[in-house]
């Protein structure tokens, strides 16, 4: 082991960052370096102390020596089939995870991925086994997902992949782990073609129903970035609008088999992505009568019309925009409920080449009713605490706002029936405290206690959000 220094200039000042690095001897008399510990910026005295510590660790131990299994004064010639061990001196050294790694290698071979990548990732100029590095990355993602840095620093030496693959620490060199991702990108289409065929052979998988959705992941890095960089500011599903992000689009089957994915710029609008995926799936897997299932914010009316007019027509199951619910309300009210299955009822409305489905799930109603009751119970308890406090008007309004934020459905008009007598006491007590502290002409907070009557289910096309 030794100390390594990396120099970085920031704001015109030179910074020195130190790490402890270990040399690992690999096949072919090669040396791979493993980062053992990151020290950051240290002063000269700390540097000297760390060097002495490394010297003690490296040179303070007795040199290894070869010993016989049996001592010279013991004759075991007549017991050639017996091995005598001192159980008190047995030690466990470098334990490694074997079972999960072995099972992964079996699954990897069953899918034919070992042969697939061996034909497309030949050894590098320095005899780098890229197909084995990729297999290591896949095993790591399945068994203990994390960063490539953690794989390099910790996980590889705690696993039995080196033994199973007949390789060494050269598979976990940090730079090769990152470079491997660039090599496999060019084979994405061929990989999906291979996997879909294997899924058909192994599981008789069907690809008639496709689930399409988008998500995003953010980066805590500061722009500016190169013009072609996909990290952009956009709508953040992670509630981090201050961070740049990328949008990830994915198509899977109901069984969870992926068929396509794309990484899109972070400012991509959901409604602009569907058209390209329709063309991509048709070009890669051919024209077929497929059913697309997606959120209501993804397709546009123009895209849906194009799906209906295609040959063969593409079917879809998508949530109706909230703006259209009021237009369909009268027609749906006139239709009878039909039982689809236990605790699920539907209404079917044929309109303009589409079938609108209004669903009501009693289990969903019960679940949301219980959620509102739980929130309302917590809100009642908080209002009881606030009623006993002597707070100024502004402070009380802040606490009421915080309580409402923690129970967003608790104060919804008619959101839950009165399940506890006397609850209105705490609501009106809080109201009176605010009114007493309100300046002349200022706003007064008013909380209304529902009367316990069910105002009716609030439902939408393809789903039900029953109010209770």
Image (cartoon, rainbow, N blue to C red):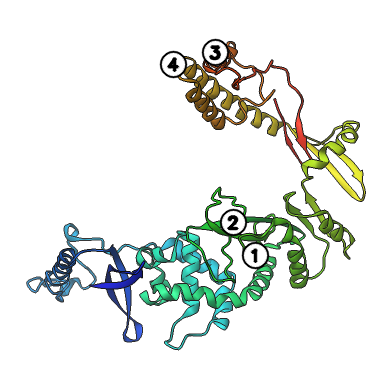
Side of 291 where 254 appears, left or right? left
The Cα atoms of the two marked residues, 3 and 2, are separated by 44 Å
Q: Residues within 10 Å of mark 4 (few under 14, many from 20)?
A: few
The Cα atoms of the two marked residues, 2 and 4, are separated by 45 Å
Vertical placement of residue 452 versus 394, above or below: above
The residue to which callout 3 is attached is 429
Q: Position of residue 338 (x, y in %)?
A: 85, 35
Side of 366 where 102 appears, left or right? left
Q: Earlier in the sequence, mark 3 or mark 4?
A: 4
Of residue 172 and residue 41, the one placed in the foreground of this image is 41
Q: Quadrant of residue 47?
A: bottom left
Q: Which mark is residue 292?
A: none
Element class at badge 1: strand
Q: Position of residue 459 (x, y in %)?
A: 76, 34
Q: Quadrant of the C terminus?
A: top right
Q: Residues within 10 Å of mark 1 (few under 14, many from 20)?
A: some
The residue to which callout 4 is attached is 390
The residue to which callout 1 is attached is 261
Q: Quadrant of residue 150?
A: bottom left
Pointer 2 with pointer 4, Cβ within 8 A: no
Q: Position of residue 369 (x, y in %)?
A: 65, 27
The residue to which callout 2 is attached is 216
Q: Earlier in the sequence, mark 3 or mark 1?
A: 1
Element class at badge 2: strand
Q: Earlier in the sequence, mark 2 or mark 4?
A: 2
The Cα atoms of the two marked residues, 2 and 1, are separated by 13 Å
Side of 105 where 345 appears, left or right? right
Point out the residue furthest to the bottom here: 125
Pointer 3 with pointer 4, Cβ within 8 A: no
């Amino acid at each position: 082991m030794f100390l390594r220094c990396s120099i970085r200039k920031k704001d015109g000042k030179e910074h020195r960052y130190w790490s402890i690095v270990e040399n690992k001897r690999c096949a072919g008399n090669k040396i791979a370096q493993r980062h053992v510990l990151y020290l950051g910026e240290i002063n000269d005295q700390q540097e000297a102390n760390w060097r002495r510590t490394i010297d003690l660790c490296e040179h303070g131990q007795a040199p290894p020596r070869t010993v016989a299994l049996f001592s010279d004064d013991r004759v075991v010639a007549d017991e050639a089939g017996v091995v005598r061990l001192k159980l008190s001196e047995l030690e466990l050294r470098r334990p490694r995870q074997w079972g999960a790694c072995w099972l992964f290698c079996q699954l990897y071979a069953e899918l034919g991925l070992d042969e697939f990548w061996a034909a497309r990732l030949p050894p590098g100029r320095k005899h780098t086994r890229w197909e084995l590095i990729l297999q290591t990355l896949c095993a790591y993602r399945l068994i203990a997902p994390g960063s490539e840095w953690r794989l390099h620093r910790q996980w590889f030496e705690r696993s039995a992949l080196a033994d199973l693959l007949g390789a060494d620490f050269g598979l976990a060199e940090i730079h090769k782990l990152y470079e491997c991702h660039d090599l496999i990108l060019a084979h994405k289409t061929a990989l999906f073609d291979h996997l879909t065929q294997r899924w058909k052979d192994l599981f008789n998988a069907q690809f008639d129903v496709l689930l399409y959705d988008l998500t995003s992941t953010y980066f805590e890095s500061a722009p500016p970035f190169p013009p072609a960089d996909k990290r952009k500011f956009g709508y953040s599903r992670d509630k981090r609008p201050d961070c740049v992000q990328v949008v990830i689009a994915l198509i899977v089957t109901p069984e969870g088999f992926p068929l396509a994915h794309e990484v899109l710029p972070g400012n991509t609008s959901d409604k602009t992505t569907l058209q390209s995926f329709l063309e991509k799936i048709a070009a890669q897997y051919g024209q077929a009568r497929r059913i697309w299932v997606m959120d209501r914010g993804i397709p546009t009316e123009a895209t849906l019309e194009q799906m209906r007019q295609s040959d063969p027509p593409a079917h879809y199951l998508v949530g109706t925009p909230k703006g259209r619910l009021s237009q369909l309300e009268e027609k749906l009210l006139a239709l009878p409920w039909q039982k689809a299955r236990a605790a699920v009822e539907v209404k079917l409305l044929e309109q303009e080449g589409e079938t609108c489905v209004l669903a009501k799930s009693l289990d969903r109603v019960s679940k949301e009713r219980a959620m509102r009751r739980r929130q309302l119970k917590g809100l009642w308890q908080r209002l009881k605490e606030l009623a006993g406090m002597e707070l100024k008007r502004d402070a009380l309004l802040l606490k009421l706002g915080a309580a409402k934020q923690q129970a967003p459905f608790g104060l919804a008009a008619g959101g839950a029936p009165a399940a506890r007598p006397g609850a209105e006491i705490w609501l009106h007590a809080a109201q009176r405290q605010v009114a007493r502290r309100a300046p002349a002409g200022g706003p007064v907070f008013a909380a209304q206690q529902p009367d316990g009557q069910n105002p009716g289910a609030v439902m939408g096309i393809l789903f039900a959000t029953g109010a209770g």
